[in-house]
Amino acid sequence: MSAEQKDGRTWMDVISDYNKPDIKKSIWQIINSLGPYILLWAAMYYSLQVSYLLTLGLAILATGFLVRLFIIFHDCGHGSFFQSKKANKVVGTILGSLVFTPYDYWHREHSIHHKTVGNLDKRGSGDVKTLTVEEYEQLSTGKKLYYRIYRNPIILFVIAPFILFVIWFRFPRKSMGKAGRRSVYMTNLIVVLICVPLILLMGWKAFLMIQLPVIYMATVAGVWLFYVQHQYEDVIWTRQEEWDYRKMAMEGSSFLKFPRLLQWFSGNIGYHHIHHLSPKIPNYNLERCHKENQMFGEIKPVTFVPSLRTMSLRLWNEKAGKLITFRQYKKVAQTPAH
């Protein structure tokens, strides 16, 4: 894909038009995301008196708003939601706490992810662990089993997300650095300041009946979104010597074309190719950037149903230049070398 438009403008010229946050849009997005989320909590509490099935139905809706709040948290870490660094950190820290996520630690890892996405020589930070065919073949039987368990959709999308966000992020570690550890302490404090009054107000049982399904579904949705943004059939990954920032953003990050409602709840993060091209673009400008510039017209979208099939992908086949399933790997392994 050409790095220039027909008018001669480069991709850097193009994204500069969308890199500026709009304070009115940012504040309104917080209002229309946090406001309904709070109201839904109240509705879920009162719905417990009627039917827990009704509560769970409202929890699904609340999950959508919580995912949207996480996208705002995500934008704050990139410095794209407000012009003020302090405003980004304060708002990001508070909103991140609703998903039990430490601001500085998470965004340090996420920053590394942006600098190394699709780089086979720099995997390990902010990534879903993915081995090449050759790496997998060199593993012992026990380690192969461990990797198969790790990549199993039940582990990856049903069990691990809750453990990661709710449990793993509660504990500081030396590898986090001082800022990362402080963010863990701050997040834990805010979580306590939010949860304890709610427990005192509604009782621990009602609190857990609401909080657990909402945070569970939100973490599952978040991990799946992150996964499918870089693990899909036409994705490209390269070695360091061939790695190119623009090419990796455009061809190593998916354009998820969701139904309009899902796009809204996911904060336009489906335009992930634009986001990786410029993390400074606030989420409410991503769709406009994509639609207003012909250089993005060649990007092949990944629609909702095909995106679900990506969960079967397991290994990177360097020779074929694509992600493959274990079933496909068996065929590769059984093919005699020439």
Image (cartoon, rainbow, N blue to C red):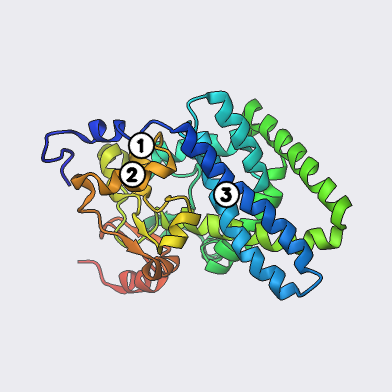
Q: Secondary structure at mark 3?
A: helix
Residue under pointer 3: 33
Give the Cα distance between marks 2 and 1.
Answer: 6 Å
Give the Cα distance between marks 2 and 3.
Answer: 23 Å
Q: Whole-percent x and y of residue 85?
A: 53, 25
Q: Secondary structure at mark 1?
A: loop
Q: Nearer the viewer, mark 3 or mark 1?
A: 3
Sequence-wise, the earlier of marks 3 and 1 is 3
**Whether residue 120 is situated above or below residue 139 in the rendered picture:** above
Using the rendered view, name the quadrant where residue 316 is placed: bottom left
Q: What residue is drawn where x is 63% and y is 42%?
A: 95
Instruction: Check if mark 3's residue and mark 1's residue have beta carbons within 8 Å.
Output: no
Sequence-wise, the earlier of marks 2 and 3 is 3
Residue under pointer 1: 278
The answer to whether residue 69 shows anywhere in this view is no
The answer to whether residue 42 shows anywhere in this view is yes
Q: Secondary structure at mark 2?
A: helix
